[in-house]
Amino acid sequence: AWVGAVAYALQLYFDFSGYSDMAIGAARLFGIRFPLNFHSPYKADSIVEFWRRWHMTLSRFLRDYLFIPLGGHRKSAARRYFSVMATMVLCGLWHGAGWTYVVFGALHGVYLAVNQTWRLARKRLGWRRGATTWWGTGFAVLLTFAAWLVGLALFRSATLPEAVTALAGAQLRQPLRIEAPASAEAERPDITQRAIEVDTARRTPLLRHLIAQEGWRQLLVFVATQYASEHVADKLQRA
């Protein structure tokens, strides 16, 4: 189940970041400079850093037109946390009118509030950020990515009960099955859905199953292409 969740996280990122980079490159052909929209978000070592790297144009919009007008960092701590929660709940509603999106936004609001509290505690204790060890940074990156995967279970599910089932499946190492909304895209073969439906306890090993699928080879090619295009887009942005 966790492998399926990671596969969906990669699919979402490569798809979203890929066409954003294509738009940046196409615009440069006409002399138009678009801002960079993704900057290796899965390398972020905190959820605050993650939202500075993920869908950066949306993050800046939410900061400038919601968070700061609501008070931002200029008010009390309680007001600041309220502003964070309100901004992220509205961010969830921006993605879709459903309870799963509302809870997704609220969850990330809690993430950001906890992260900000931790940063203040580090500052008061005199812990310098640059003094973090490599294994500490690695653990922070993994923890941030795991928190993102939990949120994706809500984002991907059609209803809250399905999200609970998805999270329970991840904890119990059971197959994760989420009913996607009926659409033309849902009818097409999807390597992520195949990975999700594999029962690793009763069927052939998951890796062997994925390698046997044509989509897995396409995914590997896409990963390599996206990795190269991300660095090209970064250089174009700085040029």
Image: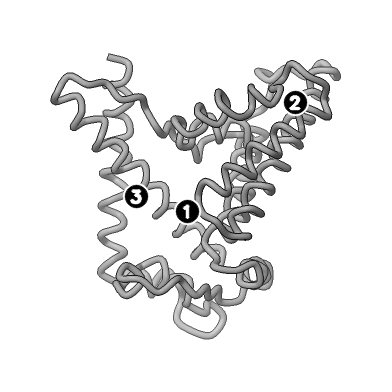
Question: Looking at the image, which is closer to me, 123 or 88?
Answer: 88
Expressed as whole percent of the image width and height from the top left, the position of residue 92 reads 58, 48
Q: Residue at x 55, y 73 (%)?
A: 176
Query: Which residue is located at x 45 percent, y 72 percent?
Result: 206
Q: Earlier in the sequence, mark 1 or mark 3?
A: 1
Instruction: Please tell me how crowded label 3 is: few (under 14), some (14-19), or many (20+) other residues with Cα within 10 Å.
Output: few
Q: CA distance from mark 2 to mark 3?
A: 32 Å
> Contact (CB < 8 A) between labels 1 and 2?
no
Is residue 175 toward the left or the right of residue 182 in the image?
right
Residue at the image position 64 percent from the left and 22 percent from the top:
68
Q: Residue under label 3, please give it.
A: 15
Q: Which mark is residue 17?
A: none
The residue type indicated by label 3 comes to: Asp
Neighbour tally class for label 2: few under 14, some 14-19, many 20 plus, Cα within 10 Å: some
Label 2 close to label 3 by CB (< 8 Å): no
The residue at 56%/26% (across/down) is 65
Say what amino acid the circle numbered 1 marks.
Answer: Ala
Q: Earlier in the sequence, mark 2 or mark 3?
A: 3
Q: Do the residues bearing badges 1 and 3 touch, measured as CB atoms within 8 Å?
A: no
Identify the mark nearer the N-term, 1 or 2: 1
In the image, 207 versus 42, the foreground residue is 42
Among the 4 quarters of the image, the one containing residue 237? top left
Number of numbered callouts drawn:
3
Q: Which residue is mark 1?
A: 9
Mark 2: which amino acid? Arg
Q: Specify the label residue 119 is tagged with.
A: 2
